[in-house]
Image (cartoon, rainbow, N blue to C red):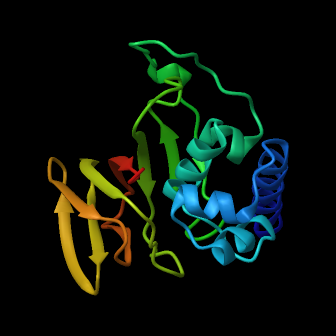
Amino acid sequence: MEEQARNICIAIGKRIRSIRHERRMTLDEMANKTGFAKSYLSQIETLKREPPISTLTKIAFVLGVDVLFLISGEAGRGEKQSITIMKVSERRVIPRPSGSPAYTYQPVNDKKMDRLMDGYVVTIGPDFPLEPLVHEGQELCYVLEGTQEFLYNGKSYTFKKGDSYCFESSKPHYTRAVGNKPAKVLVVFVSKR
């Protein structure tokens, strides 16, 4: 599993670098457009840091590609339209390359090519990731199933089915399921662009 996670991270970094070079964009230019430090972007491209989905979303926006292409290498599944519909049978599961193996993401709006936000149904396992997430933007979360413990900026919160919360993603945060079953949360990321 660790080797598979490492291979996914390597592929993500290579795709970012390749697209950036195709666009004739320097790391400095990408840093200015994303708001991320040049050193952080370099670490992503060289596999020294694994970026969270929200960071990949912002990078994908700046590069003009779909975030799922950065993760999987598959071409975007949509086109610019004022409405896009995604049936449950069309959603696919994206495992996190590292961290808790029970963390998975199911995109709910990746068919909309000109979207301003990214939504996922996130399945959360019983373990906290090894490191908290910290990234630009905001997140809106709505608990669909189960109970979760959410650590945000050093404080613990417990959320149950039907609860919702919104927060600045630039503060350290991570979560785990509480009880004997995973939690499912609808998460919407919005990057400050």
Please indicate, yes or no, whether residue 102 appears anywhere in the rendered image.
Answer: no
Task: Using the image, determine if residue 156 lies above or below residue 91.
Answer: below
Q: Residue at x 30, y 77 (%)?
A: 151
Give how far across and how far down residue 114 sits, in percent. Answer: 49, 27
Q: Residue at x 45, y 67 (%)?
A: 135
Identify the image quadrant of the N terminus.
bottom right
Q: Is residue 95 left or right of residue 176?
A: right
Task: Using the image, determine if residue 40 lies above or below residue 180.
Answer: below
Please indicate, yes or no, whether residue 167 appears anywhere in the rendered image.
Answer: yes
Q: Nearer the viewer, residue 82 or 129?
A: 82
Q: Is residue 116 left or right of residue 77?
A: left
Q: Residue at x 62, y 36 (%)?
A: 66
Give how far across and how far down residue 120 sits, in percent. Answer: 43, 42
Q: Residue at x 31, y 55 (%)?
A: 139
Give how far across and how far down residue 37 sits, in percent. Answer: 59, 73
Q: Nearer the viewer, residue 37 or 88?
A: 37
Give how far across and how far down residue 49 sits, in percent. Answer: 68, 74
Q: Is residue 49 left or right of residue 93?
A: right
Q: Nearer the viewer, residue 4 or 167?
A: 167
Task: Using the image, determine if residue 121 lies above or below residue 35.
Answer: above
